[in-house]
Image: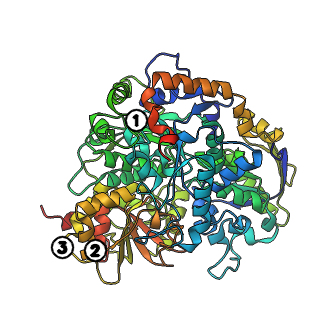
């Protein structure tokens, strides 16, 4: 939405146009129903996911206009944002959530939409449930009224986060009228060092490129470091796309993707699955495809990352100190950094390692999957959470919770003094009762360290699951590499 | 049909910082109910202290800016969460026009869907407008003329902003986006029918709701 955007011409929207295409172009072009004015496209939405805090007004709008849901079979709903995560919870456990949870249940029932609520074994955060059920598939276009919908890009799907009016638009028309994003690519070179995860390299990238670098763009993550990542780590990478302003993030699917997708509840089976894989193999970027923005990140020297400010771009390696705002050449960035440090209660020059914490949160659509919990458990095994630290593990879905329990991870966490809770967004968005107290400092595996995000005057440090587990045990931010046995 | 928007006249408040996120525009405390007082929630954590008292240093608590109709702000306004309540809160407070050098994508879409004009100004215009507000702090009244893509200041000074022409037309006419899209209903159904043939794996029985009550 910059001035240059207004006049930009895109050449590949017409599927009949040949020439080098990106992964994004291929999927997008297959979904264009019609070209619209102002460089917008009407795209077909294959899969639509609803959550309770951004859909009530959409159903209200439908009712007001006397419209129906055009394709209820292409939508699924869950309850994740405002649900209690207390083990054994139901819709009434968090009294502040009953209105929106009740509306979700009633609206989906009235329109014939499947609802994976707190009483359903598939309940989970939208961006965990969507792919673990096989509802999201490579090559599909999925929307949800939530900004982290880009997560499914880790499978090679277009995930578009939208507002409530657009949720209503999708319900009523099964399409979205949207500006065609420009192509951007970030290539991750080199291998990840010991103790370094997907979270660290994506935070490092956001720190390098800035919080608005992806605005208006479909970002393809490529390069050897990305190709080596397991699927859940790719989902983490794509999840964070919105944190540098991107419209969506994508990673080309490969054999690891196909193996991950196979056998899930809504995944096609038999010959249909084989036809799907044959098509998914074509979801690649041509070697000579052009990108409007193209960056390279060297992963070799990346240390475990931790944020020090109130924007995801305020990030550094755990082995350095809180920066002096004066070091920023841009005066606006300097002012923001100074305000951030004041909010965070930090002095320039303070080593990040050693900053005491009050709360440690492991979970969210960024890092609430099984492999994230395994990474945290590997650090927590046989240890104890520091006195005066509240540490909680909130699985991203009830499926993740069951899988983790089958592996005995809950015992490791509980023995160490972590709370082992039911699935939901929890302390990432703190709309339910999982709130950080005013002035308290929380290290979290979630995605936003904004002012007041985890509660009024809460202070958030974003990091990887292993880093958060290590901080919970030490009672302060610590370099997880020192905690790992070689 | 929505309420048409052609001009916005009123006080212009300035929030100079860049990257203002939607958590700041409408904190999550106001998202727990479909009936929350969003006008009060606008910039809630910055406008009010813990006891709910106004913070006098925040612009929307000061003189003519208490009834601001236009907001002038920095790059990448509305980043972060997709929450449309950010736009609802601005509109219910009375702000029908936000001017900035750039907007976050989801906020930008949400604004137009709610009859709020998100006008792009270049950096020089942003600075000139902010200076004009400073010179007229007692009566910082501006008129944003959408058909003319012009901003007229208290000194009669004229500035321009950018808005894609079709979006401007939609605001001026009060078009409803869903109505416009439903004109393409045949094309939508043709697309789905074709997809079911060519990509049966994407549209097989697994998405048939009747099999999964």
Q: Are marks 1 and 3 on the same chain?
A: yes
Q: Position of residue B74 (x, y in %)?
A: 63, 54
Q: Secondary structure at mark 3?
A: loop
Q: For mark 1, name the chain.
A: A
Res. B77 in view: no
Mark pair 1, 3: CA separation: 39 Å
Depth order, front residue of A255/A467: A255
**Color style of the picture:** rainbow
Do tags 2 and 3 sit on the same chain? yes
* Horizontal arrangement in the rendering, residue A400 relative to residue B46 (left or right): left
Characterize the local packing of mark 1: few (<14), some (14-19) or many (20 or more) Cα atoms within 10 angstroms: many
Q: Does residue B205 sit above or below A107 in this rendering?
A: above
> Residue A129: where, in percent of width, then height?
42, 51
- Looking at the rendered structure, the secondary structure element under dot 1 is loop
The residue depicted at 50 percent of the width and 47 percent of the height is B213
Q: Which residue is mark 1?
A: A138
Which residue in the structure is indicated by mark 2? Answer: A414
- Could you tell me which chain the residue with mark 3 belongs to? A
The residue at the point 46 percent across, 34 percent down is B205
Name which residue lies at 69% across and 33% down.
Answer: B181
State the CA–CA distance, disc 2 to disc 3: 10 Å
Residue in the foreground of this view, choosing between A373 and A224: A373
Q: Position of A343 compared to A134: left or right? A: right
Look at discs 2 and 3 and give the one toward the viewer: 2
| Disc nearer the start of the sequence (1/2) | 1
Q: Earlier in the sequence, mark 2 or mark 3?
A: 3
Picture disc at residue A382: 3
Q: Quadrant of the N terminus of chain B?
A: top right
- Viewer-proximal residue, A368 or A18? A368
């Amino acid at each position: 939405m910059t001035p240059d955007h207004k006049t930009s011409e895109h050449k590949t929207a017409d599927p009949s146009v040949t020439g080098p295409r990106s992964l994004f172009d291929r999927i997008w072009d297959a979904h264009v129903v019609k070209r619209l004015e102002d460089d917008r496209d009407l795209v077909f939405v294959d899969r639509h996911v609803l959550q309770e805090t951004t859909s009530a007004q959409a159903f209200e709008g439908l009712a007001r206009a006397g419209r129906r849901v055009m394709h209820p079979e292409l939508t699924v709903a869950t309850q994740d944002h405002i649900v209690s995560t207390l083990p054994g919870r139901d819709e009434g456990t968090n009294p502040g959530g009953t209105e929106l949870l009740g509306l979700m249940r009633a609206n989906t029932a009235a329109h014939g939409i499947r609802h994976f609520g707190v009483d359903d074994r598939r309940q989970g955060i939208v961006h965990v449930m969507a792919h673990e059920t096989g509802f999201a598939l490579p090559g599909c276009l999925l929307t949800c009224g939530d900004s982290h919908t880009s997560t499914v890009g880790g499978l090679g799907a277009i995930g578009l986060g939208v507002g409530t009016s657009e949720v209503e638009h999708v319900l009523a028309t099964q399409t979205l009228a949207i500006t065609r994003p420009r192509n951007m690519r970030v290539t991750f070179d080199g291998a990840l060092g010991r103790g370094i995860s997907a979270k660290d390299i994506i935070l490092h990238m956001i720190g390098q490129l800035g919080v608005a670098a992806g605005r208006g763009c479909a970002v393809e993550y490529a390069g050897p470091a990305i190709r080596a990542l397991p699927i859940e780590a790719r989902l983490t990478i794509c999840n964070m796309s919105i944190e540098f302003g991107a419209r969506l993030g994508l990673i080309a699917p490969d054999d690891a993707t196909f193996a991950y997708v196979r056998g899930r509840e809504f995944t096609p089976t038999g010959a249909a699955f084989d036809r799907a894989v044959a098509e998914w193999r074509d979801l690649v970027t041509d070697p000579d495809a052009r990108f409007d923005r193209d960056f390279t990140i060297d992963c070799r020297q990346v240390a475990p990352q931790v944020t020090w400010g109130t924007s995801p771009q305020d990030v550094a390696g755990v082995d350095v100190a809180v920066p002096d705002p004066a070091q920023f050449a841009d005066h606006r960035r300097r002012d923001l950094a100074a305000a951030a440090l004041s909010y965070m209660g930090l002095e320039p020059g303070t080593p990040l390692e050693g900053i005491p914490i009050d709360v440690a949160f492991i979970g969210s659509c960024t890092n609430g999957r099984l492999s994230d919990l395994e990474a945290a458990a590997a650090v927590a095994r046989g240890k104890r959470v520091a006195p005066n630290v509240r540490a909680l593990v909130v699985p991203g879905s009830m499926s993740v919770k069951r899988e983790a329990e089958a592996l005995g991870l809950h015992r490791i966490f509980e023995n160490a003094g972590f709370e082992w809770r039911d699935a939901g967004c929890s302390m990432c968005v703190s709309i339910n009762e999982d709130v950080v107290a005013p002035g308290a400092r929380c290290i979290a595996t979630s995605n936003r360290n904004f002012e007041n995000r985890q509660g009024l005057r809460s202070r958030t440090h974003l990091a990887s699951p292993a880093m958060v587990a290590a901080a919970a045990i030490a009672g302060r931010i610590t370099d997880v590499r020192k905690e790992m046995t070689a | 049909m929505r309420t048409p928007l052609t001009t916005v006249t009123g006080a212009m408040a300035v929030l100079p910082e860049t990257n203002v996120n939607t958590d700041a525009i409408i904190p999550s405390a106001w998202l727990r109910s479909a009936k929350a007082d969003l006008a009060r929630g606008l910039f809630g954590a910055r406008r009010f202290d813990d006891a709910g008292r106004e913070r006098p240093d925040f612009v929307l608590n000061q003189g003519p800016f208490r009834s601001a109709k236009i907001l002038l702000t920095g790059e990448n306004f509305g980043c972060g969460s997709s929450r449309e309540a950010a736009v609802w809160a601005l509109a219910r407070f009375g702000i029908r026009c936000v001017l900035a050098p750039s907007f976050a994508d989801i906020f930008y879409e949400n604004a137009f869907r709610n009859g709020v004009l998100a006008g792009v100004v270049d950096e020089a215009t942003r600075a000139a407008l902010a200076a004009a507000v400073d010179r007229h702090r007692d009566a910082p009244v501006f008129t944003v003329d959408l058909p003319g893509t012009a901003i007229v200041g208290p000194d009669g000074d004229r500035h321009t902003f950018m808005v894609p022409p079709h979006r401007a037309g939609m605001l001026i006419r009060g078009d409803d986006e869903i109505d416009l899209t439903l004109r393409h209903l045949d094309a939508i159904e043709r697309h789905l029918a074709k997809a079911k043939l060519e990509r049966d794996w994407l549209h097989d029985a697994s998405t048939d709701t009747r099999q999964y009550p």
